[in-house]
Amino acid sequence: QILYDMLRRSHLAVRFYLDSLVFPETTGHQNAKLSANGQDLGGEMLFSRRIAFSGTPSSLLPLEMNECFHHLGDDAKMLRTLTDPAVVSRRTLGADWSVPSVLEEVASLTPGALALIDAGALITKMSNL
């Protein structure tokens, strides 16, 4: 208790505690990150030729792709597809789920899954290596 009382108001001690113990346990992060926005990734920065661009419909397209045209009903068509039981299925995760168990379940589906939409960003701390 004496040590806690001495250090609890020290911004250096609090920062060390958060950076060394709390954040590594609760947030997935890398030592270095590359970052780019949709304009960068869809533009000529990576590829000189593109046949499509996927992302949130907006007018924030790469300059090389010109203006975005929104067609009436596009959002409704997307929602209809994503809520159609003939196209989409869902599973309720048990209380003991883990990232590897979710991926193993998806990989063992018959017929196989064509896509995994991780809307809650649950799949983290994984590597392609």
Image (cartoon, rainbow, N blue to C red):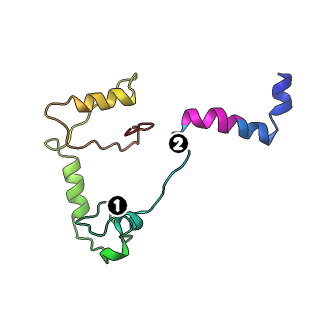
Name which residue type carries label 2.
His
Image location of residue 85, percent across then percent down: 17, 41
Residue 95 shown left or right of residue 16 in the figure: left
Q: Residues within 10 Å of mark 1 (few under 14, many from 20)?
A: few
Q: Is residue 50 visible in the rendered structure shown here? A: yes
Q: Nearer the viewer, residue 54 or 78?
A: 54
State which quadrant residue 31 falls in. top right
**Neighbour tally class for label 2: few under 14, some 14-19, many 20 plus, Cα within 10 Å:** few
> Earlier along the polypeptide chain: callout 2 or callout 1?
2
Quadrant of the rendered structure where residue 17 is? top right
In this view, the residue in front, 47 or 66, is 47
Where's residue 100, x and y in %?
Answer: 36, 28
Q: Which residue is mark 2?
A: 29
The residue at 72%/37% (across/down) is: 16
Which region shows up in magenta? 17-26
The prevailing secondary structure element of the residues shown in magenta is helix
x, y (%) of residue 8?
Answer: 80, 34
